[in-house]
Amino acid sequence: MSQPIITLRDKAYAHLLANYLVSQGHPASVQPLADNTYQISLNSETDLEQVKSICEAFIREPNHPRYQQAAWQSGEQINLPKSGGAIRNKLIDNARHAPFTAVIFILCTLTYGLSLLGLFPAIYQGLTMQPLGVLFTTHEWWRLIGPVFLHFSALHFVFNLLWWATLGAQIERTLGVSMLLLVFVVSAIASNIGQLLVSGPNFGGMSGVVYALLGFIWWVGWLKPSWGMTLPRAIVGFMLVWLVIGYADVLWVNMANTAHLVGLISGCLLAALLAIGSGRRQSA
């Protein structure tokens, strides 16, 4: 016998919540009501307190990426309302709840925009990596992170920034700005130094950081599924295949393969350390 738990006015959001409940082990279904609302009901006995907590979190942040990802994993694409006002409000909401993600996005966009206006040589000279021996002489330590703001084509820029906006916001909204800042700084420095040591200082882009975000969310979802951070397997598979293709050197562009690999490893390691530390605190 089904048990009603919540009623929503929007059909898309009702199905989004129901999909997420199912992904968390709470079989649920959606039934339309006569007053043009949609009732979500549980199809079996379950932990009502946990269901209540999930519903309350959904009401606070219905546009959180975790809910759409649950729909992707179930094979159902939920089309949320996309009016101009809704899109603008969603962008503002994302910036408010993920400010560090928004700041980095804006900085990369400004850097790329100024590059298109003919300032690329000056920007490149100011942000590019230097050999470690030179860095210890000049003390221009910002160059350890600077290359992540450099992008050499529109495709390079759009690819990296879309992944940054999606994955970075998920980490920041779930675990806070300090955790995303840690992942960003550690992965940027590690991937840039790795690429420098293997191929020299002539490189740029946020791909190493993007791979770190991918690895971080992937391993957190595996080690701590209760935290609600997941990635569809298709996305993980695509990014890993792309990594292999880069090393196969069959593309028409030069890829910073070492930065990708080091970024991925650093993200996975940070997730593992976080999960282990969390487990020890709970045991204590």
Image: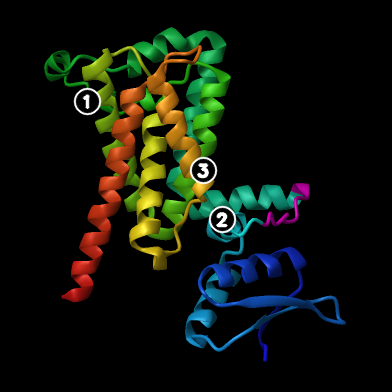
Kind of residue indicated by mark 3: Ile
Residue tagged 2: 69
Q: Kindly check if marks 2 and 3 are in contact, taking CB atoms under 8 A apart as contact.
A: no
Residue 263 magenta: no
**From the viewer's perspective, is the residue at label 2 or at label 3 nearer?**
3
Secondary structure type for disc 1: helix
Look at the image and give the residue range highlighted in magenta.
76-84
Kind of residue indicated by mark 1: Trp
Q: Position of residue 274 (x, y in %)?
A: 26, 57
Magenta stretch mostly in which secondary structure?
loop
Q: Is residue 261 above or below residue 40?
A: above
Residue tagged 3: 235
In the rendered structure, the answer to whether residue 187 lies left or right of residue 197 reads: right
Secondary structure type for disc 3: helix
Instruction: Decide if residue 164 is in sight here.
Output: no
Which dot marks residue 141? 1
Tell me if mark 2 has few (under 14), some (14-19) or many (20+) residues whose alpha carbon lies within 10 angstroms of its own: many
**From the viewer's perspective, is the residue at label 3 or at label 1 nearer?**
3
Tell me if mark 1 has few (under 14), some (14-19) or many (20+) residues whose alpha carbon lies within 10 angstroms of its own: few
- What residue lies at 49% left-to-right and 85% top-to-bottom? 47
Q: Position of residue 222 (x, y in %)?
A: 37, 58
Task: Compute the Cα span from label 2 to label 1.
Answer: 38 Å
- What residue lies at 60% left-to-right and 57% top-to-bottom? 68
- What residue lies at 56% left-to-right and 22% top-to-bottom? 155
Kind of residue indicated by mark 2: Gln
- What residue lies at 33% left-to-right and 52% top-to-bottom? 179
Secondary structure type for disc 2: helix
Task: Compute the Cα span from label 2 to label 3.
Answer: 11 Å
First in sequence: mark 2 vs mark 3: 2
In the rendered structure, the answer to whether residue 122 lies left or right of residue 5 reads: left
Instruction: Decide if residue 24 is in sight here.
Output: yes
Residue 77 magenta: yes
